[in-house]
Amino acid sequence: MSKIVIVYHSGYGHTAAVAKAVARGAAGVADTTAQLVSVDDIAKHWADLDEADAIIFGSPTYMGGVSAPFKSFMDASAKVWFVQGWKDKLAAGFTHSGSQNGDKFNTVTQLFTFAKQHGMIWAGLGLMPGNNTSKGSNSDLNRLGGFSGALTQSNNDQGAEAIPASDLKTAEALGARVAAVALRLAREQESVAA
């Protein structure tokens, strides 16, 4: 059994919708449980992160980086960092913004750097970019062309219900990939120990 924790911040509900999609993807893999943890409730969930086989980080992109509440969570993890408590756990990330670009790559890079400082093993999206040929469309998976993590977008003047289905499916694909890799790593560790 593999445990995946999705820790995220959502200012207006969009990133929460994406986090739920990531959790659906992870939970859809046999022998996997997925747990959502909002950074607003992190004080109650440090043990869940410690027990996780993989942690997927999610933040909206605000002003070209993670949101202030997510950054507060990052800073609060210093005690874990000091003892390398998440070392060798699998990590991944996702972000959402109103702009198709919006400097989302900076946010994913910030999540990646955070995970690497904790000694974690980063898993990228693992999908080829969509919507990048004359035959492509906004319905393609990975329509925003991210490799490092799942990138999602919806208009600023609409709620989470306006997130394109393809973006939510892309987020599900990230969750499923992380769950599959976590199980594979667990099997490899079991065979080495045997």
Image (cartoon, rainbow, N blue to C red):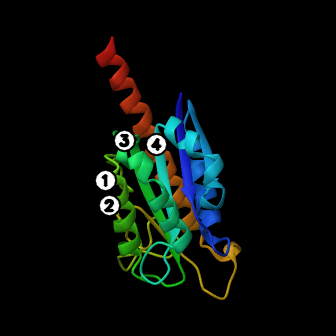
Kindly identify the amino acid type of the residue bearing the numbered disc 3: Val
Kindly identify the amino acid type of the residue bearing the numbered disc 1: Lys
User: Mark 4 sits on what residue?
Assistant: 54
Distance from Cα at disc 4 to Cα at disc 1: 13 Å
| Disc 3 versus disc 1: nearer the observer | 3
Q: Secondary structure at mark 4?
A: strand
Distance from Cα at disc 3 to Cα at disc 1: 14 Å
Give the crowd class for mark 4: few <14, some 14-19, many >=20 residues within 10 Å. Answer: many
Q: Nearer the viewer, residue 184 or 13?
A: 13
Q: Nearer the viewer, residue 14 or 29?
A: 14
- 112 displayed left or right of 38: left
Q: Nearer the viewer, residue 3 or 24?
A: 3
Which residue lies at the image location 31% right of the left edge and 53% below the top edge?
Answer: 116
Q: Secondary structure at mark 3?
A: loop
Kindly identify the amino acid type of the residue bearing the numbered disc 4: Ala
- 105 displayed left or right of 140: left
| Disc 3 versus disc 2: nearer the observer | 3
Distance from Cα at disc 2 to Cα at disc 4: 16 Å
Distance from Cα at disc 3 to Cα at disc 2: 17 Å
Which residue lies at the image location 42% right of the left edge and 81% below the top edge?
Answer: 64
On residue 116, the disc is 1
| Disc 2 versus disc 4: nearer the observer | 2
Do labels 3 and 1 touch, CB within 8 Å?
A: no
Distance from Cα at disc 3 to Cα at disc 4: 18 Å
Give the crowd class for mark 3: few <14, some 14-19, many >=20 residues within 10 Å. Answer: few
Give the crowd class for mark 1: few <14, some 14-19, many >=20 residues within 10 Å. Answer: some
Relative image position of residue 34 (x, y in whole percent): 60, 43
Which residue lies at the image location 58% right of the left edge and 65% below the top edge?
Answer: 9
On residue 83, the disc is 3
User: Mark 2 sits on what residue?
Assistant: 113
